[in-house]
Amino acid sequence: MPMEDTLSIIEEQVKVVHASIQKPDVFTNSSDFWRPGAHGIFEGFAIAQSLSAAQHTVAGGFVANSLHGSFVYAGNSEDPVLYYVERNRDGNGFCTRSVRALQKEKPIFICTISFAKQRSPESERHSLQHSSPMPLGIPEPENTFSSASNAKIPFINRSVGVLDRSGQRQPEDKLFHQWFKSSGPLSSSSGPRVHQSALAFMSDSYFLAGVPHSHDIWHFANPPISEFHPSPNGLSKLTEKHSKIQRPHLETHKEKCEKNISRVSMMVSLDHTIYFHNMENLRADEWLLSEVRSSWAGDGRGLVQQRIWARNGTLLATCIQEGIVRLENRKATSNL
């Protein structure tokens, strides 16, 4: 088989096939889950594979315009996941699908996905159009694919850093920028739907961590996947506006000895929403710019928003996520 037709790792991770049960519209993962070292599975799996499963049930010419999902139970990397797709509506302009991702008969993720029929250039002339511009002055990563050292991970990133818009160190004013893309080129046989599923997969790679990072809290009792696979060469040194995103547990073990450091004890996603834009401009194997901010935190939860642009400035996705974020309850101890 020619090299260009070999599936990349991220293609293998988002791919689903018909399940071997006598029911229509039931799919399952086609390969083992990527195991980054954390417990459970990367939540991007359920998001991307649910989208891939729903895509199998929609006619050509329809592209997903939104996905709204909730995480129910934690998944594991050992058992297969079954994706039950329900065809809620098939219209001339829009289709709706609901997907239940079950593992050992327990739901780990449920979502509703809307598909919109692609419009002709002529019809676009009668539509209102605007989008948020890509921020200026963001250092760009090298325009090369990953080396052999990245051969076992689905995607790579290049961290830019933290931008404090007001200079007042307020959590809601901070923006977190990074570039990401698949770790290798997608095969020539992959169509736009595969690139869209790959984007959905990567959209959860650095997201909820924006809540504690907005408060300058960098330590985790159990670091999330995004903290285990940081950028090997960040770009914060190339910009005066950004400060570095700290990942102390990868740099030193001193924090384990310090008693007064705030540390995240629990961080779990509750839901995930993606609004897709301009999918005709998406290439998941080309650098994409992500901007994450947190507009609210309270009651043991936090909310984050993310915008994703193509390198040419086209807005590709707007994402929203809420999750549980709790700090360690460290009781003061006496030295007496």
Image: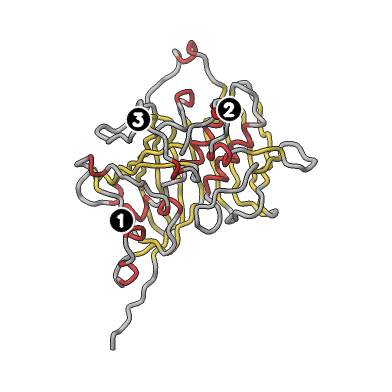
* Label 2 crowd (10 A; few <14 / some 14-19 / many >=20): few
Can you tell which quarter of the image residue 332 is in? Answer: bottom left
Q: Which residue is mark 1?
A: 215
Q: Quadrant of residue 112?
A: top right
Q: How far is the residue under mark 3 from the one under mark 1?
A: 26 Å
Q: Where is residue 66 shown, x and y percent of the image?
A: 52, 34
Q: Mark 1 is on which residue type?
A: His
Pick the front one: 110 or 261: 261
Asked if residue 122 is positioned above or below residue 97 in the image, the reply reads above
State the separation of the CA atoms marked 3 and 2: 40 Å
Q: Quadrant of the N terminus?
A: top right
Label 2 or label 1, whichever lies nearer to me, is 2
Seen in the picture, residue 143 relative to 32 is either above or below; the reply is above
Q: What residue lies at 59% left-to-right and 41% top-to-bottom? A: 49
Residue 237 picture location, percent across and down = 23, 44
Within-10-Å neighbours for mark 3: few <14, some 14–19, many 20+: few
Marks 2 & 1, CB-CB < 8 Å contact? no
Residue 315: give x, y in percent of width and height. Answer: 39, 29
Residue drawn at the location 63% of the way across and 35% of the way down: 54
- Image side of residue 72 versus residue 216, left or right: right
Q: Earlier in the sequence, mark 2 or mark 1?
A: 2
Q: Which residue type carries mark 3? A: Ser
Q: Nearer the N terminus, badge 3 or badge 1?
A: 3
Q: Mark 3 falls on what kind of element?
A: loop
Q: Is residue 156 left or right of residue 100?
A: left
Q: Residue furthest right?
A: 22
Q: Which mark is residue 132?
A: 3
Q: Which mark is residue 2?
A: 2
Q: Which circle marks residue 174 in the picture? A: none
Q: Nearer the viewer, residue 87 or 221?
A: 221
Q: How is the image coloured?
A: secondary structure
Q: Is residue 39 above or below residue 56?
A: below
